[in-house]
Image: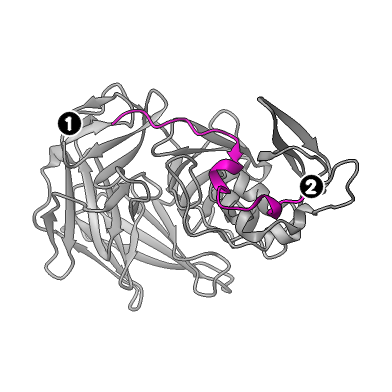
Amino acid sequence: MGLVPHPSPICTMEEVGANSKKDDLEVKNENDDTIRDWANLPGDLLIQILQHLYLDDVKRFHKVCKSWDALEDPKEHNPLTFPTIPSQWLVHKDTYNDTVLKFFHGVYDHSYSVDIPELLSSVLLYSNNGWLLLREGIEIIFFFNPFTNERVDLPNKPGWVVWKGAIFLSEPTATDCMVFGVMSVMGKWVRIYTISRGEGDWEESVFDFDEDDTPMFQSVCSPVFHNGKLYCLGAEGKMGVFDLKGRNWTIHDVSGRPHVDQTDESYLLECNGQLMAVFLSFMGQEICVLALDADKMEWEKVDSLGEFMLLISAPTSLAVKAVIAGMENKIYFPRFYDHQIVFYCLKTCLYKTFGSFSKEDLFETAEQLNCCWMQPSAARASTPKHLDCSIYIIIREGNCIEELLVKTCQLRCNWPIIGLRMANATWL
């Protein structure tokens, strides 16, 4: 597959409003008193513009005024040219500038950076529904939504506890939100911490093992909550299961496990209602995808993902239907080659990018640390803050294209408008 065209930062009216009548956008010249307020632009035209905006600009768009904020995000987008909310993103907490989040797309070779001072000295733990779960220091745990700047703090956990993995089940503002934290040391014992919304303290369950018990060394990946139970993948393919209802813990010696040489890395996730695991040998020289038969506790080989794609990382792994043609039946890694995300194609059995890279292993690729995959949420804060931003209109006069700065929400020009963009947005 060839290179995907680099998206333009300008959304043209010719692209998004070819079917809109010229009269839909009234303007004013020196001899005309007609004014059309930007807040009263036709809703269908605004929806078409939204379909083609960058992820950053979708957020800015909603903060321009109340009428624009009231618009629902469109269900259909044009992600081949403009990556938008339905796409999954690899989010990285910058190691050198400790308040910067960077977002990378699986197809496009550019990234977005957002400076969020609230994230100083924090570490990514997990993501779900557009929210991040982070740890600040040893005890402080909190949720943060980088698309709405909302923060929700959790009760402090015990200071000596270092979690091996952590997850939450729904948005922190939901009544059924529950958080799990798992701590395991050398496979000899495990501690599981849970808290639900409205509770003031973490509930701890401790499970110690006898010397005769076979230890299970937990994988670096986060656990998965499936059918009322918390599944923790062992590094060699075993499975630890925590039953929330009875608060009991069982280790299963799952049959069909991969050879120990194939388990340098392992990741657990849920795909279409079934638990799956991805196992890799050193630098991906061998890779296998297995599905768990939870009734028989058996691993079964998976040869094709169909229309699904897997996005794996230690904090968060996702299985979703591909939103862009050509992304399906692939496993996406937190690894880069020439600024592009590396994936494994189950059809060709090769590691590739959407550029020229193609190899049988992961040598020559760079791993991105302190990152996780996330699905941005279209939900916005219930009490929106508005942006003071500069709005530019792009006009055409003959063969010349000119960009004009609009400092108010009223448009005063008599040339055909062919596009718009927003810049330098700041919170009021």
In this rendered view, identify the residue nearer to me: 272 or 5: 5
Q: Quadrant of residue 220?
A: top left
Question: Which residue position is annotated with label 1?
Answer: 285
Mark 2 packing: few (<14 Cα in 10 Å), some, or many (20+)?
many
Q: Earlier in the sequence, mark 2 or mark 1?
A: 2
The kind of secondary structure element at disc 2 is loop
Amino acid found under the numbered disc labelled 1: Gln
Compared to residue 240, the image places residue 362 above or below, namely above
What colouring does the structure picture have?
one colour
| Secondary structure mostly seen in the magenta stretch | loop
Asked if the magenta segment contains residue 398, the reply would be no
Image mark for residue 354: none
Q: Name the spot of residue 42 as percent of width and height, x first.
A: 67, 58
Q: Name the spot of residue 185 as percent of width and height, x first.
A: 33, 50
Q: Name the spot of residue 63 as percent of width and height, x first.
A: 71, 52
Q: From which residue to which does the magenta span run?
A: 1-26
Q: Nearer the viewer, mark 2 or mark 1?
A: 2
The quadrant the N terminus occupies is top left
Q: Could you tell me how far apart the alpha carbons at marks 2 and 1 are, in whole angstroms? A: 62 Å
Q: Residue furthest bottom?
A: 245
Question: Which residue position is annotated with label 2?
Answer: 27
Amino acid found under the numbered disc labelled 2: Val
Say whether residue 140 is visible. no
> Residue at (17%, 52%) from the top-left corner?
290
Q: Name the spot of residue 137 as percent of width and height, x first.
A: 57, 45
Task: Give the total of numbered labels.
Answer: 2
> Residue at (11%, 56%) from the top-left corner?
300
In this rendered view, identify the residue nearer to me: 343 or 33: 33
In this rendered view, identify the residue nearer to me: 419 or 188: 419
